[in-house]
Amino acid sequence: MRVAYITAGAASMYCGSCIHDNALAAALSRRDADVALIPTYTPLRTDEENVALDRVFYGGVNIFLQQQWSFFRRTHRLFDRVL
């Protein structure tokens, strides 16, 4: 079974939701499921082995800047990836 588990990041803090999501993805993986734990906005931070993807989708800083200032809504994709 293939599972894409989307979770919000913790912004470099320990978060109960992140720890729960990470533990659930690890347990599914141990039961032979192909699990992709996909962090959004900020990276996950857990006290156990992190099974999340290395890439963060929808960077939190970039989304904030795009909502606040229209200039950032029209920036080049390469610039968006940096943020």
Image: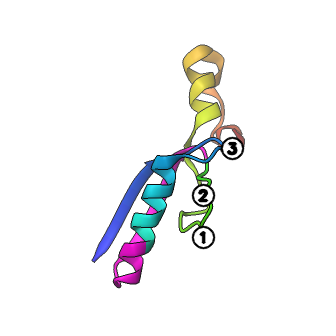
Write down the quadrant of residue 59 in the picture.
top right
In the rendered structure, are the residues bearing label 1 and label 2 in contact, judged by CB atoms less than 8 Å apart? yes
| Residue in front for this viewpoint, 3 or 44 | 44
**Position in image of residue 5 (x %, y %):** 38, 59
* Residue at x 59%, y 25% (from the top left corner): 64
Q: Nearer the viewer, residue 78 or 54?
A: 54
Q: Going by the picture, which residue comes out furthest to the top?
A: 69
Where residue 66 appears, as percent x and y from the top left, is 58, 23
Q: Is residue 10 above or below residue 69?
A: below
Q: CA distance from mark 1 to mark 2?
A: 7 Å
Query: Which stretch did the figure color magenta?
Result: 27-42
Q: Which residue is mark 1?
A: 49
**Which is nearer the N-term, disc 3 or disc 1?**
1
Q: Is the residue under label 3 in contact with that under label 2 (CB below 8 Å)? A: no
Task: Give the secondary structure at mark 3.
Answer: helix
Task: List x then y, in percent, for residue 16.
Answer: 49, 48
Whichever of labels 2 and 3 marks the residue nearer the N terminus, that label is 2
Q: Dividing the picture into quarters, in which one does residue 70 lie?
A: top right
The part of the image, by quadrant, that contains residue 62 is top right
Amino acid identity at mark 1: Glu
